[in-house]
């Protein structure tokens, strides 16, 4: 006799014949292997157990569209100042716009942020470096469109270190997110086309706030 498998609202025998709406042990085991991130978020808001047959149990990925739109990026950056000059890399946006930024970038999964910033400085500038102090943290939140009318609710967490060059030679990155690397006099930074992170990093470097945070927009 062909095995009957119950899943969600239907049970199938052979080639999909409907037998019964009751779930079986096979179905429970199958759902146990699914990612239940959305269900965990639901439980935090409402501890009432989900019942078999509810669409939220069978389709956890459809529970909360806003949760699926959320993106978190953790990145680490270096403020390297030498002889009244700061080391910057020129970032190239997707639309071709170019602005100077601190050398650094996103963490790989499982990577330590110190390893991240040392790796990124070498990739973008050619220099070997070491971090000498943790200056602080900064966070941004943005929304940008996706396909089919959806959007992404993006949050970026930036870890900012003070660093110093220990070796290597200045060079430009190829096939990356930046196209130039250069030392700029601190006095000329305000005249550069730059991202906000440059000013934040310099303020952290100059003021060394006890909580590691620059006040922006009164917050």
Image (tube, rainbow, N blue to C red):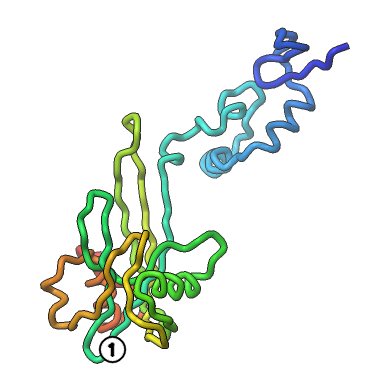
- Which image quarter: residue 58? top right
- Which image quarter: residue 150? top left
Give 61 or 85, whichever is nearer the viewer: 85
Give 216 or 156, whichever is nearer the viewer: 156
Query: Horizontal and vertical percent for residue 160?
Result: 37, 73
Q: Single out the residue that lies furthest toward the right.
A: 1
Give 16 or 103, whichever is nearer the viewer: 103
Query: Horizontal and vertical percent for residue 59?
Result: 57, 28
Quarter holding the C terminus is: bottom left
Q: Residue at x 25, y 71 (%)?
A: 198
In the image: residue 122, left or right of residue 36: left
Residue of label 1: 82
Q: Residues within 10 Å of mark 1 (few under 14, many from 20)?
A: some
Quarter holding the N terminus is: top right
In the image: residue 110, left or right of residue 31: left
Query: Horizontal and vertical percent for residue 196?
Result: 23, 65
Helix, strand or loop status at disc 1: strand
Q: How many marks?
A: 1
**Vertical position of residue 151 compared to residue 92: above or below:** above
Query: Horizontal and vertical percent for residue 132?
Result: 42, 86
In the image: residue 39, left or right of residue 8: left
Q: Residue at x 29, y 44 (%)?
A: 144
Q: Residue at x 72, y 15 (%)?
A: 11
Q: Single out the residue that lies furthest toward the left.
A: 191
Q: Residue at x 47, y 70 (%)?
A: 116
**Vertical position of residue 110 compared to residue 6: above or below:** below
In the image: residue 38, left or right of residue 148: right
Give 93 or 37, whichever is nearer the viewer: 93
């Amino acid at each position: 006799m062909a095995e009957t498998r119950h899943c969600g609202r239907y049970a199938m025998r052979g080639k999909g014949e409907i037998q019964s709406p009751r779930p079986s042990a096979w179905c429970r085991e199958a759902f146990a292997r699914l990612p239940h991130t959305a269900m965990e978020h639901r439980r935090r808001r409402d501890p009432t157990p989900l019942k078999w047959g509810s669409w939220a149990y069978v389709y956890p990925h459809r529970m909360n569209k806003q949760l699926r739109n959320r993106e978190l990026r953790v990145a680490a950056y270096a403020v390297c100042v030498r002889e009244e000059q700061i080391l910057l890399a020129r970032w190239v946006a997707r639309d071709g716009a170019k602005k100077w930024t601190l050398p650094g970038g996103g963490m790989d999964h499982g990577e330590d942020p110190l390893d991240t910033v040392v790796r990124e400085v070498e990739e973008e500038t050619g220099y070997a470096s070491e971090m000498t102090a943790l200056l602080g943290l900064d966070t941004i939140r943005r929304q940008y469109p996706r396909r089919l009318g959806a959007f992404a609710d993006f949050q970026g967490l930036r870890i900012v270190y003070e660093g110093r060059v220990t070796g290597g030679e200045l060079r430009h990155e190829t096939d990356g997110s930046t196209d130039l690397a250069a030392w700029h006099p601190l006095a000329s930074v305000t005249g550069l086309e730059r991202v906000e992170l440059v000013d934040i990093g310099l303020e952290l470097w100059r003021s060394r706030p006890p909580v590691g945070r620059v006040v922006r927009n009164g917050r």
